[in-house]
Amino acid sequence: MVSGTSTRFDQPNLARVSDALLGGCDHYEADRAAVRRLLDIAPGAETMAREHRAWLVRVVRFLAAERGVDQFLDLGSGLPAAENTHQVAQRHNPDARVVYVDNDPVVQVHGRAVLEENDRTHVSGADLTDPGATLGDPIVYRHLDFDRPMALLLCGVLHHVDVLDRAQHIARTFAAELCPGSYLVLTHHHAPTDDPPRQALAQLLDSTFEGTALATVHRSRAEIASFFTGLNLLDPGLGYLHDWWPDGPRLTPLDDLNFLTLGGVALKT
């Protein structure tokens, strides 16, 4: 199941842990303790969190500026951070509409406060693991037109759903509601079966944080590719985030964590 929706401040919370990794200020000691535990195993986690955000920025910019997408449904969006989906999309198209979906009450409060004066961006408290309820939420269906193309974002989300069949159901149900010309944007933790040391690191991360706010499932390439069934992946396909249209030459060395996340953008035709 998706973890981290507790509002207790004495326990780590997935959204707040992500905020801490990105250098934000909306987190508590329990969250920082979880981050320290993560960094003990994977020292590059903070850098990878920033690289994941940079990848999302590149994708949203591409879709808004080059593909003309003016609707974005961001599922499991987390706490507001630098360069959010609406900021990037509306920079290139001021009329772009964005709906964030997150059932974490902390995220909802912060998001609505940040977006109070933005009438083209809204926050839904629906549970993304229930696609029917999410799609039926008034904030979603009143502000997005499912008869027109949109981008559906499932970034860093489905690896928190521990049963593969359920994760596939979530992705495919949402994709089925998209009209032709829409895009699915997805990232997922990856266990590289052809790289035993990195596969072992993925397994260590899964076992270490099982039952906590950081619980995750690193899946095989084939399992992650299954979320795009029936859709057409854009070049360069399902791959490492640092290979997906980077902005300029890389100035820092790659970390093992760079090879434990795959991402892709797919078109529905």
Image (cartoon, rainbow, N blue to C red):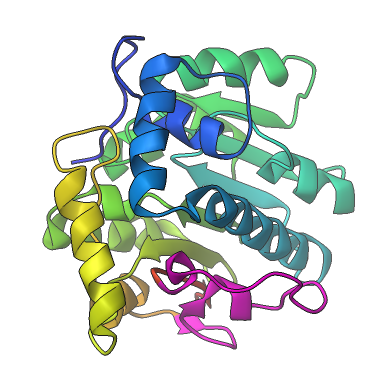
Horizontal side of 231 relative to 26 (left or right) equals: left
Expressed as whole percent of the image width and height from the top left, the position of residue 73 reads: 54, 46
Q: Nearer the viewer, residue 83 or 143?
A: 83
Please name the residue shown 53% across and 39% down the image. Answer: 21
Please name the residue shown 39% across and 54% down the image. Answer: 42
Does residue 136 show up?
A: no
Q: Main secondary structure of the magenta part?
A: loop
Does residue 109 show up?
A: yes
Horizontal side of 126 relative to 99 (left or right) equals: left
Q: Nearer the viewer, residue 240 or 253?
A: 253
Q: Is residue 113 above or below residue 180?
A: above
Expressed as whole percent of the image width and height from the top left, the position of residue 117 reads: 79, 17
Expressed as whole percent of the image width and height from the top left, the position of residue 180 reads: 53, 72
Residue 213: quarter of image: top left
If the image is split into quadrants, where does the N terminus sit? Answer: top left
Please name the residue shown 67% across and 45% down the image. Answer: 85
Residue 262: quarter of image: bottom left
Give the residues drawn in magenta, as a range.
Answer: 232-259
Is-magenta flag for residue 245?
Answer: yes
Q: How many numbered marks are there?
A: 0
Is-magenta flag for residue 115?
Answer: no
Task: Please identify the residue farthest to the front as the structure is shown.
Answer: 40
Q: Nearer the viewer, residue 3 or 150?
A: 3
Horizontal side of 188 relative to 6 (left or right) equals: right
Expressed as whole percent of the image width and height from the top left, the position of residue 211 reads: 14, 36
Please name the residue shown 36% across and 46% down the image. Answer: 40
